[in-house]
C-alpha cells in the first residue's frame, strides 16, 4: 500500500536509530529485540535525484525489503502531496518497485522529497531532490525580480537550442545511420549496417569517406584532436555512459549535448539527470535513472561542429521470473536463473557491482529462444557472498548469495549437495506460458505455443545438463493450451488468475528442482563426455561421483586395467582414465560403472587438419592488385570429415555475398574479393577447424591506387605584390606507391580557365608563384601524382597578391630578472600565426604615471629572438612593457602589457661566479686571486689562509661584485688553502682556492749503486732539498752504457728515492743521472759513479754460498698527497712503505690514532697502505700521518686534507 503522508513512530515505543547498508538511508527500530524471521524495513534501491525540464514527467522509484511487508509513504519538505492529479503513486508488481509520478512538472514542485517505509518493527527513510529547469520567460517572475534592462539576458539564458531533426524519408536510409557510423570504430561498421538494414557495404564505404572528410573539416575549426570515441553502454549502477578524448583549440569553446536534436542541460558534479565528467582531455557523459524516454540519438557539439554521435536504444524487456536469494555451503555450486518477457541475446551479470564473464569460476548459459538466462557460480567460497544482479536493457533484478562455512565434523557420512538453485528449474514451463501469451497476441496461438513450449523444455534440458521430467513438459504444454482464449492471462499484468497460475508454476518448478537435487545427491555428479583425441597426444576421461566408491572402467564391454600407456586414477570421488599416447585402436566406446550407476562416452582418435607445404609457402606471399581489380587466394588441404573452413580479413570472418565470393571444396578453398579498394588492405587468413583442433595460414592484400589529395589546408607563407608562396602537406594515403611529384594549377577569380603553373618533385611541398598581379585574387589547386595516377585536388581559398596581413599579438612580456641597471624580458610567439612568417618583434615601454609608450627598437630593426634585456631604465622607477610581431607588412597588434616592475636589485644570497680553485705560482712572482660574486645587499668580504686570518702584508682590494687578494712578491711559505667568505643578511657563501708557490727544484744529493741480485742494480740517492717544500716534486732517472753510448730515460715520476735497474750485463759500464722535477721545471742532474767493467765485478765463489741480508728499517717509497674534497664526496688516500721485517703501520688524524675508528676503512696490502672515507664531512679535515715501525727503525709521512662546502 502507498499513501502520500509521512508516518511517525507509534507512541510508547523505543527509537533506536542506525544506518542502512545503502548510503543515505536512516533506519529507526521500534523494538529492542526483533523476533526471529522478522526484520525492520530497509531500502534495497533508493530513489535518485532528478533534473527535468518544466512540463515533462518526473518520477521517483524505490525498492524495499522487510518482514512483514512495509507500508510506503511519500512526503515533500515544502508543500503537501494530497492532490491526486499532480501526484500519482503506484506499485509495480512485476518489478517490485514503488513509484510516485509527477505529470507536467512545474517549477513550484522543485523540492526535496522523502520516502518512508514502515512496519511494526521500525521505519526507514531516504530523500531525493527534484530540480526543474524553467523553459521560456516567465512574465510574473520577470517583472518582480528583474529590471527591464535584464530582459534580454534572461531570454538569452532560457532559450532552448535545437538542431535540425533527422527524419527518415520513405525508401531512403535513416539519417541517424550516418551520424552513428561517423563516430563508430571500423570494427563496428558491419554491426551498424545490419542494425539499419544497409547491405551494400562497398557503396557505404565510399559515401562514408566523403561525409567523413566534410565532418573533419568542420571539426578542425574548433578541435585540435578527437580520438577514443566509445559508444553509449549501460553500466552496472543503472546509468548509461559514453566518452571521448578531445582537445579544444579554444578552451572557452562551448560544449553542447543534444538528444534527438534538442539541447539538454547537463551537470558537472554528477547530481543531475545528464552529467559531464572531464578529466584532462577525456570527456565522459552519463545519464542517470534510466527510463524508456531516455532512448534517442545523443550528439556532442563544440560550438556548431558535431564531434560525436551515439544512438541509445532501450529494448522494452521485463523479468517474468527474477533471480532469488541462494544459500549454499562451501565447495558447492550456486545457480541463479531468470525468465525474460521477450528474447534478449545476452544480459549483463554482476557480482558485487563487478561484471562477470564466462570462465572457470562462472558458467553463463542462454536458451535457444533467448528467454531463459542462467548463471552458475562454481565451487563457492565465502568470498563469493554478496549481491548478484541480472541486467537486461534498463531492467534489472538482484538476489543475495550466502556461502556458509562447511561443518566437516557434522557432515561425516553425509553426501554433499553439489548445486543449489533458486529461481531456476522448471522455468521452461513459465517461459512456455509467456510464449503462449505472445503467440495469442500475434494470432498464431496454438502452433507457436506448442513450438515455444517444446523449445523451452529442450532449453531447460540443455542448460541443466540433465533430463527434464516428461510430465513437467507435458504439464507446461497442456497448461499453456488451456490459457488460450482466457482473458485473465492477457496481458500478463491483468487479473489475479494469472498471478495464482504463476505461483502454481513456481511451486511445480520448485518440486521439479527438489526431485533433481535428490536424484543428483545419490548419483553421478558429472558424467563422461565424448571427446575427440589427437593422435599421439594424451586423452582423459573423468567421472565425479557424489560420494566415495570404487568403480570399474570398460572399453567396448571389456574391463580395463592400468598398463603401459593407460592409467586409471581414483582421487576421492573423482575417477580418471588417462590414455597417454592415443592411437587408432584407442577409438571406441568407454563407460564407467559404480554401485549400479553407469556413465558412457566415446573417444575418437584423429589428426588436426594440415596444409600442403608448397601451397602454404605460395599462400603466405602478399597479393598485390590495383584498385578496382579482383584479388583471389587458393589453399589446398587434406580432405577430412567434419572440416570447417573459414576466411578472415583483419580478424573479421568473411561471409559469401556482396563483393566476397567463397568456394569450399573437399580438398581446397578459394577466396575472391571483387573490385578491391584501398580500404581493403590488410591481413587475409584461412582457418581450418575439425574436432581435433585448428590450423591457420595468413597472407596479405596490397591494393595500389592513385594517392589521396595533398594534406591541407594550404598555408600562404608569403604574399606580396610580386609573388604568392604556397605550402601544403604530403597526402595521408600515398595509394600504396610513393608520390613522384605535385602539379599546381591556378585560376584568377572572375575567369573560367585553370592553368598549370608548376610541377615540383615529391620532396618539395612549397611553390612560389612569381607571375601575379598586385591586388588580384587567385585560387590554386594542388594534385599529387604516383605511378597509378593523379589524386583529387586540394583547393585553396581566394588569395590576394600583396594584401597587407599583420600577425596576431604575441603573449604578454614576462619579467625574468631585474636589477638596478637592467630588466630581462621574455615572451611567447602568437598562438596562431595565420600562415604569416614573423620577421621579429618590436618592444615598447611605459613609465608609471605617464601615458606615453616609447619604442625600444624601430620596426626596421626587429628583435629576432623571444627575449630582450632592457638597459635604458632609471633605478627606482617602475615600468611596464608590450610587444608586437613584425611581418613583411609591418608591426601588428600589440600584446597586453606586462606587470609593472620596479628597477632595483633583488635581495640575493652571495653567489660566486665559477672562480679558479687552484693556482701555481713561481716563487718571487706576484699572486693575484680575483673572485667575482653576486649579492644584494652588498656582502662583507673576509679572506682566510689555512683557516687563519691572512697576514697584514697581503693586500685585499674590494669593488662592487669583485674581490681581489694580491701578494706582491710570493715565497714558498705563501703556499696553502685561501678561503674567501661573503656574508650578508640573506646568507653566507665561501670558496677555497689552493695556491702552490714553488720554483725550479735543486738537484738531488749523492747517488749510490748497489747490486744484490745478479743482473739488477739498485740506484738510490739523497732527496732534493725541495722535496719537503713541494709535494708535487718527483724524480727522473737516465741511463748510459758503454755499448750504446746514448743517454736515455729509464724511469720518470718516481716519488721515492730509489730505483732498480734491470738487464745489467757483465762487461759493460753503466752511468746514471738523477733529475728532480716539479711543475716549474727540472733540476741539474746528480751523476752516479761508474758501474761495471773491471772495477765493480762481484766475486763468485763456487765452493761457499754468499750470505745476503735483506733486513732494513722502514722507508717511504711513495708519500701521501695533498687532497681537497667537497663535503659528501668519497676520498681515497694511499702511500707505499718498504721495510724488513714488515713494519707495523698506524694512521693518525691531528696526532690521534684512527686505526680503530669505524668511520675509516684502512688496509695494508704488501706495503701499499690505504685509507678510504665513504662520505667526507667537515670533521674529517686536518693533518693525516702514516707511521711505520719495525725492529730496525721508524718512518713516517703526512699530508693535509681540506674539506670544501
Image (cartoon, rainbow, N blue to C red):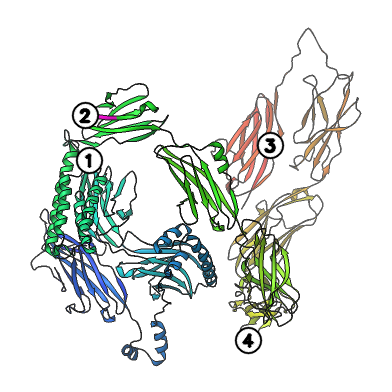
Q: Are marks 2 and 3 in contact (CB under 8 Å)?
A: no
Please state the horizontal and vertical placement of residue 329, each as a whole percent of the image.
21, 43
Q: CA distance from mark 3 to mark 1?
A: 89 Å
- For residue 157, which quarter of the picture? bottom left
Please state the horizontal and vertical placement of residue 823, each as a whole percent of the image.
65, 73
Q: CA distance from mark 1 to mark 2?
A: 19 Å
Q: CA distance from mark 2 to mark 3?
A: 96 Å
Q: Which is nearer the eye, 117 or 820?
A: 117
Q: Secondary structure at mark 3?
A: strand
Q: Which residues are magenta?
A: 590-596
Report which residue position mark 2 lands on: 594
Report which residue position mark 3 lands on: 1197
**Residue lying at 10% horizontally and 55% vertically, measured from the top left:** 35
Q: Which is nearer the eye, 472 or 810?
A: 472
Q: How many marks do you count on the picture? A: 4
Point out the tag, 1 or 2, that comes first from the N-terminus: 1
Please state the horizontal and vertical placement of residue 914, each as a whole percent of the image.
69, 58
Point out the tag, 1 or 4, that comes first from the N-terminus: 1
Report which residue position mark 1 lands on: 418
Predominant SS of the magenta segment? strand
Q: Residues within 10 Å of mark 4 (few under 14, many from 20)?
A: few
Q: CA distance from mark 2 to mark 4?
A: 109 Å
Q: Are marks 3 and 4 in contact (CB under 8 Å)?
A: no
Amino acid at each position: 500500500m502507498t499513501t502520500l503522508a509521512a508516518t511517525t513512530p507509534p507512541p510508547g515505543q523505543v527509537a533506536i536509530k542506525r544506518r542502512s547498508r545503502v548510503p543515505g538511508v536512516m533506519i529507526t527500530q521500534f523494538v529492542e529485540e526483533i523476533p526471529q524471521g522478522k526484520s525492520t524495513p530497509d531500502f534495497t534501491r533508493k530513489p535518485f535525484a532528478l533534473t527535468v525540464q518544466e512540463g515533462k514527467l518526473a518520477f521517483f522509484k524505490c525498492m524495499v525489503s522487510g518482514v512483514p511487508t512495509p507500508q510506503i509513504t511519500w512526503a515533500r519538505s515544502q508543500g503537501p502531496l494530497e492532490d491526486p492529479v499532480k501526484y500519482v503513486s503506484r506499485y509495480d508488481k512485476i518489478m517490485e518497485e514503488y513509484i510516485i509520478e509527477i505529470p507536467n512538472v512545474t517549477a513550484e514542485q522543485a523540492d526535496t522529497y522523502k520516502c518512508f517505509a514502515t512496519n511494526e518493527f521500525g521505519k526507514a527513510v531516504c530523500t531525493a531532490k527534484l530540480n526543474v529547469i524553467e523553459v521560456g520567460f516567465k512574465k510574473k517572475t520577470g517583472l518582480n525580480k528583474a529590471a527591464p534592462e535584464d530582459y534580454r539576458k534572461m531570454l538569452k539564458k532560457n532559450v532552448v537550442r535545437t538542431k535540425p531533426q533527422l527524419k527518415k524519408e520513405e525508401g531512403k536510409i535513416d539519417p541517424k545511420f550516418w551520424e552513428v557510423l561517423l563516430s563508430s570504430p571500423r570494427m563496428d561498421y558491419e554491426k551498424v549496417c545490419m542494425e539499419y538494414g544497409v547491405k551494400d557495404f562497398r557503396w557505404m564505404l565510399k559515401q562514408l569517406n566523403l561525409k567523413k572528410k566534410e565532418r573533419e573539416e568542420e571539426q578542425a575549426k574548433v578541435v585540435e584532436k578527437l580520438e577514443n570515441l566509445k559508444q553509449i553502454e549501460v553500466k552496472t549502477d543503472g546509468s548509461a555512459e559514453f566518452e571521448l578524448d578531445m582537445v579544444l583549440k579554444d578552451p572557452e569553446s562551448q560544449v553542447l549535448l543534444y538528444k534527438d536534436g534538442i539541447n539538454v542541460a547537463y551537470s558537472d558534479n554528477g547530481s543531475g539527470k545528464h552529467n559531464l565528467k572531464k578529466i584532462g582531455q577525456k570527456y565522459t557523459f552519463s545519464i542517470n535513472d534510466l527510463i524508456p524516454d531516455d532512448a534517442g540519438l545523443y550528439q556532442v557539439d563544440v560550438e556548431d561542429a558535431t564531434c560525436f554521435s551515439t544512438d541509445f536504444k532501450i529494448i522494452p524487456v521485463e523479468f517474468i521470473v527474477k533471480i532469488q536469494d541462494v544459500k549454499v555451503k562451501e565447495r558447492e555450486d550456486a545457480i541463479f536463473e531468470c525468465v525474460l518477457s521477450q528474447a534478449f541475446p545476452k544480459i549483463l551479470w554482476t557480482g558485487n557491482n563487478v561484471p562477470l564473464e564466462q570462465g572457470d569460476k562462472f558458467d553463463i548459459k542462454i536458451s535457444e529462444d533467448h528467454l531463459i538466462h542462467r548463471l552458475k557460480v562454481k565451487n563457492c567460497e565465502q568470498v563469493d557472498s554478496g549481491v548478484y544482479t541480472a541486467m537486461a536493457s534498463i531492467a534489472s533484478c538482484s538476489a543475495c548469495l550466502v556461502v556458509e562455512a562447511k561443518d566437516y565434523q557434522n557432515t561425516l557420512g553425509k553426501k554433499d549437495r553439489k548445486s543449489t538453485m533458486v529461481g531456476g528449474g522448471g522455468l521452461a514451463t513459465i517461459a512456455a506460458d509467456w510464449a503462449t501469451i505472445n503467440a495469442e497476441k500475434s494470432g498464431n496461438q496454438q502452433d507457436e505455443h506448442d513450438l515455444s513450449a517444446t523449445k523451452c523444455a529442450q532449453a531447460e534440458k540443455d542448460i541443466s545438463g540433465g533430463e527434464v521430467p516428461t510430465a513437467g513438459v507435458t504439464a507446461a504444454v497442456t497448461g499453456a493450451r488451456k490459457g488460450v482464449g482466457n482473458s485473465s492471462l492477457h496481458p500478463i499484468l491483468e487479473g489475479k488468475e494469472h498471478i495464482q497460475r504463476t505461483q502454481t508454476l513456481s511451486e511445480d518448478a520448485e518440486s521439479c528442482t527438489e526431485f533433481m537435487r535428490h536424484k543428483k545427491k545419490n548419483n553421478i555428479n558429472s558424467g563422461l563426455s565424448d571427446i575427440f583425441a589427437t593422435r599421439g597426444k594424451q586423452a582423459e576421461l573423468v567421472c565425479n561421483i557424489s560420494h566415495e566408491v570404487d568403480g570399474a572402467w570398460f572399453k567396448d564391454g571389456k574391463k580395463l586395467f592400468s598398463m603401459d600407456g593407460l592409467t586409471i586414477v581414483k582421487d576421492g570421488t573423482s575417477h580418471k582414465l588417462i590414455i597417454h599416447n592415443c592411437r587408432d585402436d584407442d577409438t571406441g566406446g568407454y563407460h564407467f560403472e559404480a554401485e549400479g550407476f553407469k556413465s558412457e562416452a566415446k573417444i575418437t582418435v584423429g589428426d588436426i587438419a594440415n596444409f600442403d607445404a608448397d601451397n602454404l609457402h605460395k599462400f603466405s606471399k602478399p597479393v598485390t592488385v590495383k584498385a578496382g581489380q579482383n584479388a583471389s587466394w587458393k589453399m589446398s588441404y587434406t580432405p577430412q570429415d567434419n572440416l570447417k573452413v573459414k576466411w578472415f580479413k583483419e580478424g573479421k570472418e568473411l561471409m559469401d555475398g556482396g563483393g566476397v565470393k567463397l568456394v569450399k571444396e573437399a580438398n581446397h578453398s578459394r577466396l575472391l574479393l571483387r573490385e578491391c579498394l584501398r580500404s581493403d588492405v590488410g591481413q587475409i587468413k584461412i582457418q581450418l577447424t575439425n574436432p581435433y583442433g585448428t590450423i591457420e595460414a595468413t597472407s596479405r592484400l596490397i591494393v595500389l591506387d592513385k594517392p589521396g589529395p595533398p594534406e591541407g589546408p594550404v598555408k600562404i607563407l608569403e604574399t606580396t605584390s610580386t609573388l604568392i608562396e604556397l605550402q601544403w602537406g604530403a597526402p595521408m594515403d600515398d595509394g600504396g606507391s610513393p608520390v613522384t611529384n605535385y602539379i599546381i594549377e591556378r585560376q584568377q577569380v572572375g575567369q573560367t580557365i585553370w592553368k598549370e603553373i608548376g610541377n615540383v618533385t615529391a620532396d618539395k611541398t612549397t611553390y612560389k608563384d612569381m607571375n601575379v598581379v598586385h591586388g588580384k585574387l587567385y585560387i590554386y589547386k594542388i594534385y599529387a601524382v604516383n605511378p597509378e595516377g593523379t589524386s583529387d585536388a586540394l583547393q585553396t581559398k581566394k588569395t590576394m597578391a600583396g594584401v597587407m596581413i599583420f600577425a596576431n599579438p604575441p603573449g604578454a612580456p614576462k619579467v625574468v630578472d631585474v636589477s638596478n641597471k637592467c630588466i630581462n624580458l621574455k615572451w611567447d610567439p602568437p598562438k596562431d600565426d595565420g600562415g604569416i612568417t614573423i620577421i621579429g618583434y618590436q618592444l615598447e615601454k611605459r613609465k608609471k604615471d605617464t601615458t606615453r609608450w616609447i619604442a625600444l627598437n624601430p620596426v626596421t630593426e626587429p628583435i629576432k629572438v623571444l627575449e630582450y634585456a632592457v638597459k635604458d631604465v632609471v633605478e627606482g622607477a617602475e615600468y611596464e612593457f608590450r610587444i608586437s610581431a613584425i611581418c613583411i607588412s609591418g608591426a601588428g597588434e600589440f600584446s597586453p602589457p606586462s606587470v609593472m616592475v620596479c628597477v632595483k636589485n633583488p635581495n640575493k644570497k652571495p653567489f660566486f661566479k665559477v672562480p679558479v680553485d687552484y693556482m701555481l705560482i713561481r716563487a718571487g712572482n706576484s699572486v693575484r686571486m680575483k673572485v667575482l660574486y653576486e649579492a644584494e645587499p652588498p656582502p662583507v668580504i673576509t679572506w682566510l689562509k689555512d683557516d687563519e686570518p691572512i697576514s697584514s702584508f697581503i693586500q685585499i682590494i674590494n669593488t662592487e661584485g669583485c674581490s681581489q687578494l694580491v701578494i706582491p712578491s710570493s715565497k714558498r711559505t705563501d703556499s696553502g688553502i685561501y678561503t674567501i667568505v661573503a656574508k650578508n643578511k640573506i646568507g653566507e657563501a665561501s670558496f677555497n682556492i689552493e695556491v702552490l708557490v714553488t720554483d725550479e727544484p735543486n738537484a738531488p744529493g749523492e747517488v749510490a749503486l748497489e747490486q744484490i741480485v745478479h743482473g739488477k742494480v739498485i740506484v738510490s740517492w739523497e732527496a732534493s732539498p725541495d722535496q719537503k717544500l713541494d709535494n708535487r716534486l718527483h724524480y727522473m732517472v737516465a741511463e748510459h752504457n758503454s755499448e750504446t753510448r746514448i743517454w736515455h730515460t729509464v724511469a720518470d715520476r718516481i716519488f721515492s728515492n730509489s730505483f732498480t735497474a734491470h738487464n745489467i750485463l757483465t762487461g759493460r759500464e753503466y752511468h746514471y743521472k738523477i733529475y728532480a722535477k716539479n711543475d716549474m721545471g727540472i733540476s741539474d742532474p746528480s751523476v752516479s759513479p761508474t758501474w761495471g767493467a773491471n772495477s765493480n765485478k762481484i766475486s763468485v765463489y763456487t765452493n761457499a754460498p754468499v750470505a745476503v741480508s735483506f733486513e732494513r728499517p722502514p722507508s717511504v717509497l711513495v708519500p701521501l698527497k695533498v687532497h681537497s674534497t667537497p663535503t659528501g664526496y668519497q676520498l681515497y688516500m694511499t702511500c707505499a712503505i718498504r721495510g724488513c721485517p714488515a713494519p707495523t703501520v698506524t694512521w693518525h688524524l691531528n696526532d690521534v690514532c684512527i686505526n680503530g675508528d669505524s668511520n675509516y676503512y684502512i688496509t695494508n696490502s704488501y706495503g701499499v697502505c690505504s685509507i678510504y672515507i665513504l662520505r667526507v664531512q667537515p670533521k674529517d679535515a686536518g693533518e693525516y700521518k702514516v707511521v711505520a715501525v719495525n725492529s730496525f727503525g721508524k718512518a713516517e709521512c703526512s699530508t693535509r686534507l681540506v674539506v670544501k662546502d
